[in-house]
């Protein structure tokens, strides 16, 4: 599944979603993780009140399952959730590499329910074992 990180230095999650200089996207599986791409946002960041500075960022993370941020406003969070992306705030700057390692461990074990939901979004066709019987009973 793809994970997005709001970052100023591309090494730590240390940016407010709206003001992030960059959003980096990684693909994470139980076997490992790899860098997918980096989106750079320059120029318009200072124009406060421009609510739609979020549009290009939302576009960048559209196919991600999780978004890590240092902070995110209420309206930004609502729009992220509307894309079925799970926003996670980190209380202090955290190295992206460490988060990726942790996620990888979680994926190897039993992911918590919110993460299972994120995984289901990602694979599209994946089914929860609990949902399996239900699917069959509907023919």
Image (cartoon, rainbow, N blue to C red):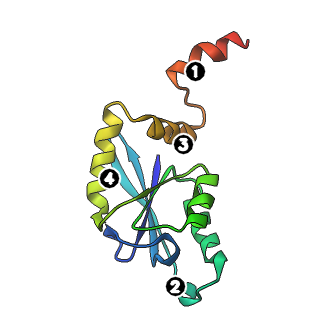
Q: Secondary structure at mark 4?
A: helix
Comparing labels 2 and 1, the label whose residue is closer to the camera: 1
Query: What kind of element bears circle 3?
Result: helix
Of callouts 2 and 1, the N-terminal one:
2
Q: Earlier in the sequence, mark 3 or mark 1?
A: 3
Task: State the CA–CA distance, disc 2 to disc 3.
Answer: 29 Å
The residue identified by callout 3 is 122
Labelled disc at residue 38: none
SS for callout 1 = helix
Q: Which residue is mark 1?
A: 131
Nearer the observer, 29 or 18: 18
Considering only order in the chain, which callout, 4 or 1, is on the residue closer to the N terminus?
Answer: 4
Looking at the picture, how far across and down is residue 102, in whole percent?
28, 47
Q: Nearer the viewer, mark 3 or mark 1?
A: 1
Query: Which numbered dot is residue 100?
Result: 4
Label 3: few (<14), some (14–19) or many (≥20) C-alpha neighbours in 10 Å: some
Q: Mark 3 to mark 1: distance in Å?
A: 17 Å
Residue 139 at x, y = what percent? 73, 12
Q: Position of residue 105 (x, y in %)?
A: 28, 40
Count residues near mark 2 (Cα–Cα under 10 Å), then give few for <14, some for 14-19, many for 20+.
few
Among numbered discs 2 and 4, the one appearing first in the sequence:
2
Query: What secondary structure is found at the residue carrying circle 2?
Result: loop
Numbered label attached to residue 42: 2
Looking at the picture, tell me which residue is in the foreground, 121 or 72: 72
* Most distant residue in the front direction: 74
Q: CA distance from mark 1 to mark 4?
A: 28 Å
Determine whether, in the image, residue 10 is placed left or right of residue 119.
left
Please tell me which of labels 4 and 3 falls first in the chain.
4
The reply to whether callout 2 and callout 3 are in contact (CB within 8 Å) is no
Answer with left or right where residue 76 lies relative to residue 97: right
């Amino acid at each position: 599944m793809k994970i997005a990180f709001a970052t100023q230095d591309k090494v730590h999650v240390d940016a407010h979603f709206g003001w992030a200089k960059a959003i980096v996207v990684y693909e994470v599986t139980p076997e490992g993780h790899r860098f997918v791409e980096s989106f750079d946002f320059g120029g318009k960041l200072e124009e406060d009140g421009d609510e739609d500075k979020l549009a290009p960022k939302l576009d960048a993370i559209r196919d991600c399952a999780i978004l890590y941020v240092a902070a995110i406003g209420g309206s930004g969070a609502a729009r992220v959730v509307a894309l079925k992306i799970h926003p996670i705030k980190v209380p202090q700057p955290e190295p992206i590499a460490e988060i990726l390692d942790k996620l990888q461990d979680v994926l190897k074990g039993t992911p918590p329910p919110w993460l299972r939901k994120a995984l289901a979004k990602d694979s599209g066709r994946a089914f929860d074992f609990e949902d399996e019987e239900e699917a069959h009973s509907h023919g």
